[in-house]
Amino acid sequence: MATLRVLMPRACGLLRRRPWPALRPFASGVNFEYIITEKKGRNSNVGVIRLNRPKALNALCNGLIVELNQALAAFEADPAVGAIVLTGGDKAFAAGADIKEMQNQTFQDCYSGNFLSHWDQLTRVKKPVIAAVNGYALGGGCELAMMCDIIYAGEKAQFGQPEILLGTIPGAGGTQRLTRAVGKSLAMEMILTGDRISAQDAKQAGLVSKIFPVETLVEEAIQCAEKIATNSKIVTAMAKESVNAAFEMTLAEGNKLEKKLFYSTFATDDRREGMTAFVEKRKANFKDQ
């Protein structure tokens, strides 16, 4: 949740005792203040969300999170979109939460207002989300990346949870997701010291899937998203649900859920089309049904 520096540029607006705005309908060409959205891919089947607060190293203010949730809801509802890419700038994916917004919060404010509860909408998106991380992914930025399904990193990316240096701890899943991703020892070291790790160390630890040059990272993520988007959306959602369940269930429970979802694919037209196309040695034409 912490930023790279405590003193960040102008905050997006004070949070104290302010209710979270409701989601606005998303329309093509809408002008957001803190993010940029577009469709990419040969068939415009990839939704791209770019965090866009460069002067603040994409610090995650409330306004940015609200806009991010709006864009995610729009791409989730768009039948043409099969996968989503979330990225930032070359210098920073997101350097953390906006500390100026939270520095005057009290325990009562946080507890009564369920502070940061709207940050995890990303985890409820059924479509696959790929994080394309260049530069800093610190605090809330690292937590945001870990909420995604796949993390691609640029060669100069850095990951960290430096909240301890600000007298607090991660509050958007950092202690939980980082431990599951890299193991207890490295997670404990990063969280207790505030030290960062490089993209190379992150890949070795299992936090990152692949590393690419800075200038080609986003395009590589879009290509992966395109490949995912060509598959059946309903079956892809089932596969994502099953993999995510591995972090929440015992092996026996997870295998039971996997079997149920596997059986469920046999109720879809896409399963029938996929197997028929394989037997007939042709490319499957999925209809997402």
Image (tube, helix red, strand yellow):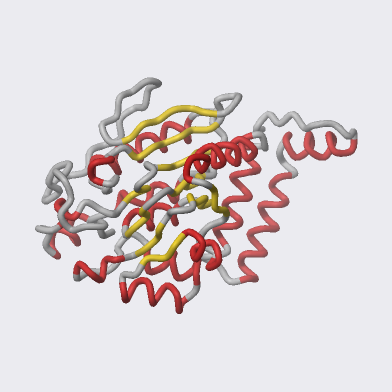
Q: Residue 103 lies in what quarter of the image? A: bottom left
Residue 149 visible, this angle: no
Q: Residue at x 51, y 43 (%)?
A: 217
Residue 277: x and y, percent? 83, 34
Residue 68: x and y, percent? 35, 39
Q: Residue at x 44, y 53 (%)?
A: 156
Q: Nearer the viewer, residue 6 or 176?
A: 6
Quadrant including the C terminus: top right
Quadrant including the N terminus: bottom left
Q: How many marks?
A: 0
Residue 11 visible, this angle: yes
The residue lying furthest to the right in this view is 280
**Relative to 274, does residue 191 appear above or below in the rendering?**
below
The residue lying furthest to the bottom in this view is 185
Q: Residue 161 lies in what quarter of the image? A: bottom left
Q: Nearer the viewer, residue 160 or 38?
A: 160
Q: Nearer the viewer, residue 62 or 200?
A: 200
Q: Residue at x 53, y 32 (%)?
A: 46
Horizontal arrangement in the rendering, residue 130 relative to residue 68 (left or right) = right
Horizontal arrangement in the rendering, residue 83 relative to residue 157 (left or right) = right
Horizontal arrangement in the rendering, residue 273 relative to residue 80 (left or right) = right
Residue 57: x and y, percent? 28, 47
Residue 134: x and y, percent? 42, 48
Q: Residue at x 42, y 65 (%)?
A: 197
Q: Residue 110 lies in what quarter of the image? A: bottom left
Horizontal arrangement in the rendering, residue 19 relative to residue 204 (left or right) = left
Q: Nearer the viewer, residue 123 or 86?
A: 86
